[in-house]
Every structure is written in structure tokens, then in C-alpha cells.
Amino acid sequence: MRKELLMSYIVGIAEEQDFLCYYCDHPMHKHQHVEGQPTPRDAITKDHYIARAWGGLTHPSNMVAACCQCNNLRGDIEAEAFKNLMWKWFKRNPYLWIRWHNVANEELYELKLQCIRVYERQLRGKAQRYIEFAYHHFDFTFRERRRLALTYA
Ligand SMILES: [Zn+2]
């Protein structure tokens, strides 16, 4: 029952997107999952807009409908960064967009490697910002403590 409810809300979201994938703009299709069978590449899947790895909630407000292909490829990249990356590929090679759900696995593998590189860059950027914040915070508290120590010495 709960699974059916989850499925129905993603179909609602897909309807709002005119049944087009949030990332690649291809039409998506509802499918009935069969145990042991791979999900078709153009199937509607739930995708966390803010990835679960970054604390994104499994809630309709954080969901977009994406085709299975884009969902698998995206991983934990920021949604808009992934969309930009996709359209950069599609503009460079429009034929890639045309046969998007029929590309060979080797090509997908290459795209996935590029996605992983982007994700690494994003992780490094985030780590850098955390470190800068920590240093800034440390510096501030250090100076503040010294100031207080001098005041009340
Ligand atoms: Zn897609």
C-alpha cells in the first residue's frame, strides 16, 4: 500500500513535468517493476533533488521525476550541475540526445566517469568551504578568548 502511494505521488510530479525527464527532457513511461528485471531506461523514477548524501529528504517537496538513465548517471551530483553537464553533452553531440535511451553501455561508462569527476570537484569545493569556515570560526573564538582573557586578567 505504502509503495503504491509513493508511486502515485511520483506519477503526479511526472504529470506536472508533462511526463518529460527533469534532466534530459525525454518522454518517460510508467512501468510495473518485476523482481529481477532491469528497470527500462525511459521509466519514471523518483529522484532526490537534494541528494540523500547531502541530507535531502525523501519527501514530495524534494522529488523530481527523472528517467531511469539520468537517475543512475546522476549519483550524488547537485541536480542543476548535472542538468548543465547533460545539456553540454547534448549540445556538443545532438545525436547523443536523439538516441539517449539507446546509447551503448561503453558510452554510458564514459559519461559516468565524467560525472564522477564533477562530483569529486564538488566534494573538494564543499570540503574547502568547511575547512575555511572552521579556520574562520577557530580564529574568531581564539581572538575572542584572548580578548576576554586580557580584559579580565
Ligand atoms: Zn532523463
Image: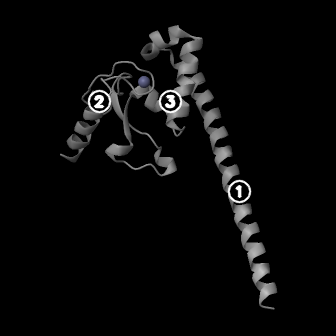
Residue 18's x, y, as percent? 30, 23
Q: Distance from label 3 to label 2 (Cα)? A: 23 Å
Q: Is residue 41 left or right of residue 73?
A: left
Q: Tally the numbered discs.
A: 3
Residue type highlighted by circle 2: Glu
Of callouts 1 and 3, the N-terminal one: 3
Q: Which mark is residue 131?
A: 1
The amino acid type of the residue labelled 1 equals Ile
Q: Work out how far the residue at label 2 is from the one at label 1, CA to CA, in angstroms.
A: 40 Å
Residue occupying the far top of the picture: 95
Q: Earlier in the sequence, mark 3 or mark 2?
A: 2
Where does residue 107 sit, x and y in percent of width and height?
A: 56, 18
- Above or below for 46 versus 88: below
Which residue in the structure is indicated by mark 2?
A: 16
Secondary element under disc 1, as helix, strand or loop, is helix
Q: Which amino acid is tagged 3?
A: Leu
**Front one among 85 and 146:** 146
Residue 114 image-quadrant placement = top right
Q: Considering the image in quadrants, where does the C terminus appear? A: bottom right
The residue located at (73%, 69%) in the rendering is: 140
